[in-house]
Amino acid sequence: MLGDRAHRLVEAACWTCLQVLHVRPGVQKKSAGSECADQRLRFNAWPLYPGHMSLRLEEVVIDCSEPSALARWWEVATGWQVIDEDEDGAELAPAPGQTPTLMFVRVADQKRIKNRLHLDWVPDDQQAEVDRLIGLGATRVDVGQGEQSWVVLADPEGNEFCILAAR
């Protein structure tokens, strides 16, 4: 028996716009007053349960053709440490035992389009960091961003990343 749980509003987030909403458990439509910003929520929410997530981010995997070389480039770029390396991959960590790590793995295919996931980095001085990274071999990239407060760069294998303005 659901009892009062059926009438309780639960915090949820819209998958589309990420706005926090209040919905009734088990109800497959929006509750009154729970409009998402773009009006597309149709049982398209997940409950927010602070403190109950059993997952943690362990590593970000980056496909590349030369994992050792790319990991060494990122090691110099970030100051992180290569903690594991073989012919098929290399792993970079902020410090031994710290996560998330960057895992570079060898793939046969070449990168052809903009990455669907990229890393955003926040420096103390954006322009100085952009200049330093370009000096290391990064290149400026136009992915259609226009004039923004961040700078889009690519590593030597073309993987995009952003240098945000200092916060």
Image (tube, rainbow, N blue to C red):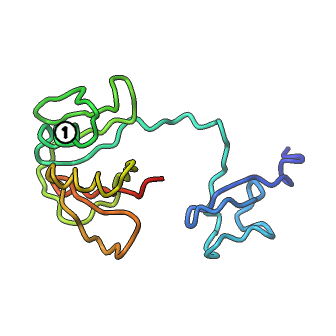
**Could you tell whether 41 is left or right of 27 in the image?**
left
**Could you tell whether 146 is left or right of 18 in the image?**
left
Residue bearing mark 1: 71
Residue type at tag 1: Ala
**Residue 78: x percent and y percent?**
28, 40
Compared with residue 19, is residue 3 higher up or lower down, i.e. above or below?
Answer: above
Measuring 84% from the left and 47% from the top, which residue is drawn there? 5
Measuring 19% from the left and 39% from the top, which residue is drawn there? 71
Instruction: Tell which of 105 and 164 is nearer to you.
Output: 164
Measuring 11% from the left and 40% from the top, which residue is drawn there? 69
Q: Secondary structure at mark 1?
A: helix
**Residue 112: x percent and y percent?**
17, 64
Compared with residue 149, is residue 58 higher up or lower down, i.e. above or below?
Answer: above
Residue at the extreme top: 97
Measuring 13% from the left and 57% from the top, which residue is drawn there? 110
Residue at the extreme right: 4
Instruction: Tell which of 166 and 152 is nearer to you.
Output: 166
Q: Quadrant of the N terminus?
A: top right
**Could you tell whether 149 is left or right of 136 in the image?**
right
Instruction: Tell which of 10 and 117 is nearer to you.
Output: 117
Q: Quadrant of residue 70?
A: top left
Q: Quadrant of residue 46?
A: bottom right
**Residue 138: x percent and y percent?**
18, 55
**Residue 127: x percent and y percent?**
31, 58
The total number of labels drawn is 1
**Could you tell whether 29 is left or right of 95 in the image?**
right
Instruction: Tell which of 165 and 84 is nearer to you.
Output: 165
